[in-house]
Image (cartoon, rainbow, N blue to C red):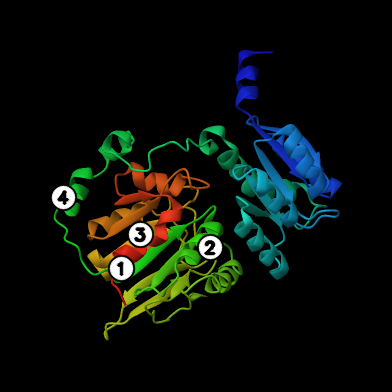
Amino acid sequence: MSTHDNLSYAQRIRVLIVDDSAVMRRIIMSTLLKHDEIEVVGTSANGLDAIADIKRIKPDLVTMDIEMPKMDGLTALKQIRSFDQHLPIIMFSSLTLRGAEATLDALTFGASDYVAKPTNLTDSDEAFRVLNEQLVPKIKQLGSKKTFVRSLARAQTVTPQSLSPLAAQSSSNEVSSVRAGRIRVTLEALCIGVSTGGPAALTQLFSDWKVALSVPILIVQHMPPKFPELLAIRLSTLGAVPAVEAVDGQEIEAGHAYLAPGGRHMELYRSASGKVIIRLNDNAPECSCRPAVDVLFRSAAKVYGNRLLAMVLTGMGNDGLKGSAQVVQEGGRVLVQDEASSVIWGMPGAVVNANLADKVLPLSEMAQEVVARLPKK
């Protein structure tokens, strides 16, 4: 075996495929085997077998169908999380209303991410294309040992010495001067950007808010249509902050949360009467995302200036980085979720590495930090 083979084997992401369909298992396996970074270490036909295989094989990542005999994917997910909180699990589901509800359940119960099942398994080329575009990049991100292995003893504060060279290359002097000259102001809005791992993170955040907040909350969660509406309904049942899927032309109210619809950007503007209004649009994606966090943060920074508090939670990629820079430039502040509590530290890490974070916190402390910064009702 060559040195290249040895290195590849040592660094490969070991994947367990769980699906009751032999055809689907074969298609997923064939897709993954085309990538040197990925190794398929086993397949399971139901959730019960999957649990036994996970304990025996100890894969780096699992792909899990939701609807299966003997034990469905949701039940298996709950049981897996009882003995392994950190194993990346990507759920497969349809994008029907029923599939969306089940997927949202899975994401709330601790699934790392999801992929829509190819609808036409007789067209193998199309099925391979869908899996290559949607599943493979998520496996490489979530399953990478360098990405996912945590150091739970890591300090929760960020010092200049711990920042990457990117921070030094950014407009750190300009940012520092803006921060140094700021005084504490009355905050008027909270904007949240989140992606992979978001439904579970938002669930914890909303559950921790026991009283209504004194400002509106605007949220971009990377999701397709149907999902934000369902997520808003669930978030409304958790605590004291009601949530809705945003509507174009809607006037925002303090104490209410508004989620950007799937596939549409959400912006804010102030009307002649002084009211802040939501505008939705179908402009080109930014950072390959629509809705994009950057779009919301940028518009909110213009509307609220130094009275804006932004929050960047777990997520893949760097959406929210440019928007956070705009927030800071206008005098606002950005809270960032720490690496240990994030499913993926792409979005939060980008903000930290650019020296734009006002504070880096574990998810469990985020709700309390927000309450402490906001004006009392």
**C-alpha span from label 2 to label 4:** 36 Å
Above or below 258: residue 223: above
**C-alpha span from label 1 to label 4:** 24 Å
Residue 88 x/y as whole percent: 62, 44
Q: Secondary structure at mark 1?
A: loop
Query: Which residue is labeled 4 in the image?
Result: 177
Q: In the shown orientation, is residue 221 left or right of residue 59?
A: left
Query: Which residue is labeled 1 in the image?
Result: 374
Residue type at the position of mark 4: Ser
Residue type at the position of mark 1: Leu
**C-alpha span from label 2 to label 3:** 16 Å
Query: Which residue is labeled 3 in the image?
Result: 369
Q: Which residue lies at the image location 57% right of the left edge and 74% below the top edge?
A: 233
Local crowd size for mark 3, using a 10 Å CA cut-off: few (<14), some (14–19), many (≥20):
few
Residue 323 x/y as whole percent: 35, 57
Query: Which residue is labeled 2 in the image?
Result: 203
